[in-house]
């Protein structure tokens, strides 16, 4: 794939900024950094002359580039070859593998979230798990690209994973059979009581239009008027900024949706309602947005916008906290730089970076048997090495309040299973909407 074609497509998955570097600005950089470049060249020459084995120049140059970007934040990176192919795959949403969103953390592959319905999801892998071995071979300390390449493969083939799950005493092994991952960005179903449940699994192309189509289908299925809607953004790692704006605009009639602010003037951008869809497609219908620690980036934009405009109640667990924008900057014909260029802010001016979106009603996933142990080791953006610091300076105590016991939520996973409740957070959201629906209120009044 050429870099030009990639840039055209990448608008679907990230905020793209083409920032030209002028000759004058480059000259200023070279003048200031001359002594530092001299150190780099001295190290390079010493390695070439004295290292025990002969070292390829490409290896040294790539290591130098990766080192610079790693020192910035966890989301900036240099893309070429397989990296560009991974971005293309993310855009197309069709490949053969396990169905995981992963990052490299402390030398291990950390799962941000398994895609719903994927082989990884069916095998029980969860957000926050660390993969340490593939088919018995240690991958800690290796590259993310190599690990991803090993996990992908022909449909029907299997791979063994050794997984460390925070909260468990010992790692465990699981075998996952690869499948064709045809990501369905939006799925939906009509729940009892004429409550719509729309699951947004990722923010790829046309998500806004897909949710609109889902809403119309739910209306056609309902026996009368829809009494409520659950927008489920749990374990959604994000994607297109434009689609997050489009989805928010479906349910807003005025005001700011999100703003992004960077150092360069061109990175200060404001996104408002009524620019993608006119009106509120679900006017007067109560909405609950479900989030958890795997809800990141574009998911947080939607949750923050609907929360700040008081269009929806946000329920679940505090989100991941990725409040930064990555721009794709071309470097020749077959390489690009994915660079963090801005932070984004909710309509009220809240920076999502580190702190994430705090739910209006904190509801733990009681149906998870590992909840008690796992909650002590939940990994979010603020835990990633080298993450951007929140300018608001959110105190640790504010995050710790999320962990306080609530007397409403004391049932165990086993007790919920006996009651036939497989997803407590969804169950609680649906019951909340049923209790507040106009039909229910009318029945109580009689």
Image: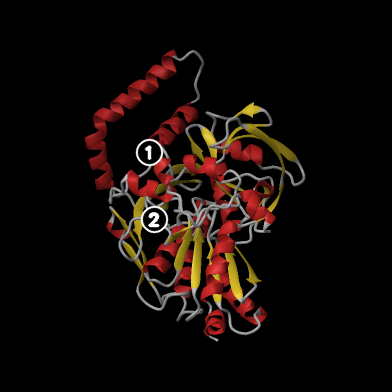
Residue 244: which disc? none
Q: Position of residue 111 (x, y in %)?
A: 55, 43
Asked if marks 1 and 2 touch (Cβ < 8 Å), the reply is: no
From where the camera sits, is residue 71 visible? yes
Residues packed near mark 1 inside 10 Å, few (<14), some (14 to 19) or many (20 plus): some
Q: Position of residue 275 (x, y in %)?
A: 41, 75
Quick check: 22 above or below 172? below
Along the line of sight, the residue nearer the viewer: 414 or 216 = 414
Number of the front mark, 1 or 2: 1
* Quarter-of-image position of residue 152: top right
Between the C-alphas of marks 1 and 2, the distance is 25 Å
The residue shown at (24%, 47%) is 24
Residue 18: which disc? 2
* Quarter-of-image position of residue 177: top right
Q: In the figure, is residue 92 to the left or right of 286?
A: right
Residue 386: which disc? 1
Q: Position of residue 363 (x, y in %)?
A: 50, 57
Residue lying at the far right in this picture: please name it: 156
Q: Position of residue 389 (x, y in %)?
A: 32, 45
In the structure shown, which secondary structural element does the residue marked by tag 1 occupy? loop
Q: In the figure, is residue 439 to the left or right of 134?
A: left
Along the line of sight, the residue nearer the viewer: 73 or 69 = 73
Mark nearer the N terminus (1 vs 2):
2
Quick check: 181 above or below 79? below
Residue lying at the far bottom in this picture: please name it: 446
């Amino acid at each position: 794939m050429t870099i030009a074609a990639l840039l055209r497509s990448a608008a679907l998955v990230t905020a793209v900024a083409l920032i030209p570097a002028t000759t004058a600005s480059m000259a200023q950089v070279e003048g200031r950094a001359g002594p530092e470049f001299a150190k780099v060249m001295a190290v390079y020459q010493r390695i070439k002359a004295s290292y025990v084995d002969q070292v390829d120049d490409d290896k040294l140059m790539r290591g130098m580039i990766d080192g610079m970007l790693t020192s910035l934040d966890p989301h900036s990176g240099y893309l070429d070859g397989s990296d560009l192919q991974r971005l293309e795959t993310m855009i197309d949403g069709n490949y053969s593998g396990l169905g995981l969103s992963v990052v490299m953390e402390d030398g291990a592959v950390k799962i941000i979230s398994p895609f719903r319905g994927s082989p990884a999801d069916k095998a029980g892998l969860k957000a926050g798990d660390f993969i340490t071995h593939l088919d018995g071979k240690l991958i800690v300390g290796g590259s993310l690209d190599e690990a991803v390449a090993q996990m992908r493969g022909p449909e029907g083939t299997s791979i063994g994973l050794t997984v460390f799950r925070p909260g468990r005493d010992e790692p465990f092994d699981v075998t996952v059979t690869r499948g064709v991952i045809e990501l369905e960005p939006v799925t939906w179903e009509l729940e009892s009581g004429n409550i719509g449940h729309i699951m947004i699994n990722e923010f790829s192309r046309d998500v806004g239009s897909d949710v609109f189509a889902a809403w119309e289908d739910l209306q056609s299925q309902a026996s009368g008027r829809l009494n409520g809607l659950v927008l489920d953004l749990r374990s959604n790692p994000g994607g297109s900024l434009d689609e997050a704006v489009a989805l928010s605009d479906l349910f807003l009639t005025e005001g700011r949706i999100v703003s992004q602010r960077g150092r360069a003037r061109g990175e200060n951008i404001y996104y408002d309602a009524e620019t993608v869809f006119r009106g509120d497609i679900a006017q007067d219908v109560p909405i609950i947005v479900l989030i958890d620690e795997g809800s990141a980036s574009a998911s947080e934009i939607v949750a923050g916008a609907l929360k700040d405009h008081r269009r929806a109640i946000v329920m679940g667990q505090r989100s991941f906290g990725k409040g930064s924008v990555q721009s794709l900057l071309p470097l020749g014909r077959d390489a690009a730089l994915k660079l963090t260029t801005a932070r984004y802010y909710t309509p009220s001016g809240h920076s999502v970076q580190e702190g994430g979106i705090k739910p209006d009603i904190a509801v733990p996933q009681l149906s998870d048997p590992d909840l008690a142990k796992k909650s002590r080791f939940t990994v979010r953006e603020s835990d990633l090495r080298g993450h951007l610091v929140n300018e608001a300076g959110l105190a640790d105590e504010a995050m710790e309040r999320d962990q306080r016991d609530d007397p409403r939520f004391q049932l165990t996973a086993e007790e919920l299973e006996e009651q036939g409740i497989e997803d407590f957070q969804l169950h609680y959201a649906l019951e909340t909407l049923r209790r507040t629906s106009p039909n229910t209120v009318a029945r109580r009044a009689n």
